[in-house]
Amino acid sequence: PPTVRAIGLAAQGHSAEDLLYSIDVPVLIVAGSEDLFSPPHLGEMMHARLPDSELITVPGATHMGLVEYPEIIGSAVERFLRRNTLID
């Protein structure tokens, strides 16, 4: 439908890159190797600009990586939270 297309086009032009420098907490960036909506190079860019960040790229994952690979992403999130003492 035209509305969905318009939303998609508007989102492609959106960037919050200028806000990354203000983030001062640990960040886990999860990228999908096959994500066309948020391509992996965007995750790499965020990782380069966030000093306390970790980047994982899930092979084969699209923008729906959490649905496609819940075990891989869930385990990565749990490890990240434990490393940063956010959970026991």
Image: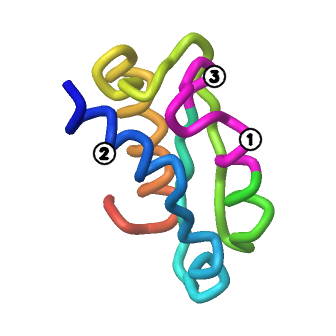
The answer to whether 29 is drawn above or below residue 35 in the figure is below
Q: Magenta includes 35?
A: yes
Indicate left or right for 67 with 14 as reference. left
Q: Which residue is mark 3?
A: 33
Is the residue 56 above or below the residue 84 in the image? above
Residue at 42% x, 31% y is 73
The mark that comes first in sequence, 1 or 3, is: 3
User: Regarding mark 1 in the picture, which secondary structure is present there?
Assistant: helix
Measure how far apart labels 1 and 2 are at the Cα level: 22 Å
Relative to 82, is 34 on the left or the right? right
Q: Earlier in the sequence, mark 2 or mark 3?
A: 2
User: Can you identify the residue that label 1 sits on?
Assistant: 41
Amino acid type shown at disc 1: His
In the image, which disc is placed on residue 7?
2
Left or right side of 46 for 85:
left
For residue 78, what is the image quadrant?
top left
Which amino acid, by three-letter code, is at mark 3?
Ser
Q: Position of residue 74 (x, y in %)?
A: 36, 33
Q: Secondary structure at mark 2?
A: helix
Identify the secondary structure beneath mark 3: loop
Q: Position of residue 48 (x, y in %)?
A: 80, 62
In this picture, is 23 found above or below 34?
A: below
Residue 74 vs residue 43: left or right? left
Identify which amino acid the numbered label 2 is placed on.
Answer: Ile
- What are the residue bounds of the magenta stretch? 32-44
Of residue 48 and residue 5, the one placed in the foreground of this image is: 5
Q: Is residue 31 magenta?
A: no
Query: Are circles 1 and 3 on residues that touch, CB within 8 Å?
Result: no
